[in-house]
Every structure is written in C-alpha cells, then in structure tokens.
Amino acid sequence: QAQLAESGGGAVQTGGSLRLSCAASEYSGRRNCLAWFRQAPGEEREGVAAINPGGSRTFYYNSVKGRFTISQDDAKHTLYLQMNSLKPEDTAIYYCAASRNAFTSASGCPANLDEYDNWGQGTQVTVSS
C-alpha cells in the first residue's frame, strides 16, 4: 500500500489561494481513485474532490465547486488540490486518500469516505476573515 504525505497547507486570508500536494510512495499502474477530504474542528470528515485513475473524470462536492481543482501528475506521483477564493469555512485539516477498490479509467469514484482505506496524515489550512 502506497504511503501518502500531504503538504502545502498554511494560513491565508479570505479570497486567497493555496495548493495542496499529496505525494505517493508508489504510483505506477494506479487503479485507485484518489480524493481529498477535510475535517474542521468538531465536525465530521467530509469529501472535497476526487479523481479517477488516469484523471479522465473529476468530482467536486458542492461546497467547493468552481473554487477548487483536483489534478494529478503521474510522473511525479503526486496529487494536487488547487484552492482559490478561500473562505473561513474552508478552514480544516485536509487529507488525501486512496480508495480501497480499483476502478477503471472511465469509471466514477465513490463519495463515501468509508470507501477509502489509505490516508495521509493531513495538512492544516486556516482561512482568516
């Protein structure tokens, strides 16, 4: 199972941008969906975005549509989350995760976090007003 390590978190003001990275120790022949989740203090972990194997399909939760972009660089074994127009309600620890099951390059990705069994340690994002 690949090791996932997030980076790129930090503190920004409302309207600012950050790009999160998730480096995977193993990436060749990836058949898992990769996703970003987040967890605010006192809240349940929630989905942010997901990308299928090959990157042909991306998915976004309503709260971040139009502001966040998920992408991947297979050559660098890295998943990204570009976050623009950040709001205070985006403040959370952001985690990358890989799905338990394999998917095809044409398939969608599961939305339920229980379908993901490989998690990074998280990176803190703080947005001040």
Image (cartoon, grey):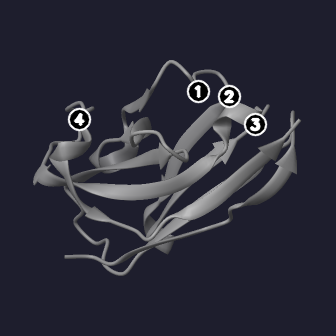
Residue 17 visible in the displayed image: no
Q: Are marks 3 and 2 in contact (CB under 8 Å)?
A: yes
Number of the front mark, 2 or 4? 4
What amino acid is labelled 2 in the image?
Answer: Arg
Residue under numbered circle 4:
112
Relative to 29, is 26 on the left or the right? right
Number of the front mark, 4 or 3? 4
What amino acid is labelled 3 in the image?
Answer: Asn
Q: Residues within 10 Å of mark 1 (few under 14, many from 20)?
A: some
What amino acid is labelled 4 in the image?
Answer: Asn
What amino acid is labelled 1 in the image?
Answer: Val
| Disc 1 from disc 3: Cα separation | 9 Å
**Relative height, residue 20 to residue 57 (above, below):** below
| Disc 2 from disc 4: Cα separation | 21 Å
Mark number for residue 64? 1
| Disc 1 from disc 2: Cα separation | 5 Å
Which residue is located at x 39 percent, y 40 percent?
A: 44
Which residue is located at x 37 percent, y 42 percent?
A: 51
The quarter of the picture where the N terminus appears is bottom left
Residue 6 location (% of width, % of height): 52, 68
Q: Secondary structure at mark 2?
A: loop
Q: Earlier in the sequence, mark 1 or mark 3?
A: 1
Q: Earlier in the sequence, mark 3 or mark 2?
A: 2
Mark number for residue 67? 2
Q: Residues within 10 Å of mark 4 (few under 14, many from 20)?
A: few
Which residue is located at x 56 percent, y 22 percent?
A: 63
Which residue is located at x 89 percent, y 35 percent?
A: 129
Residue under numbered circle 3:
84
Quarter of the image where one finds residue 119: bottom left
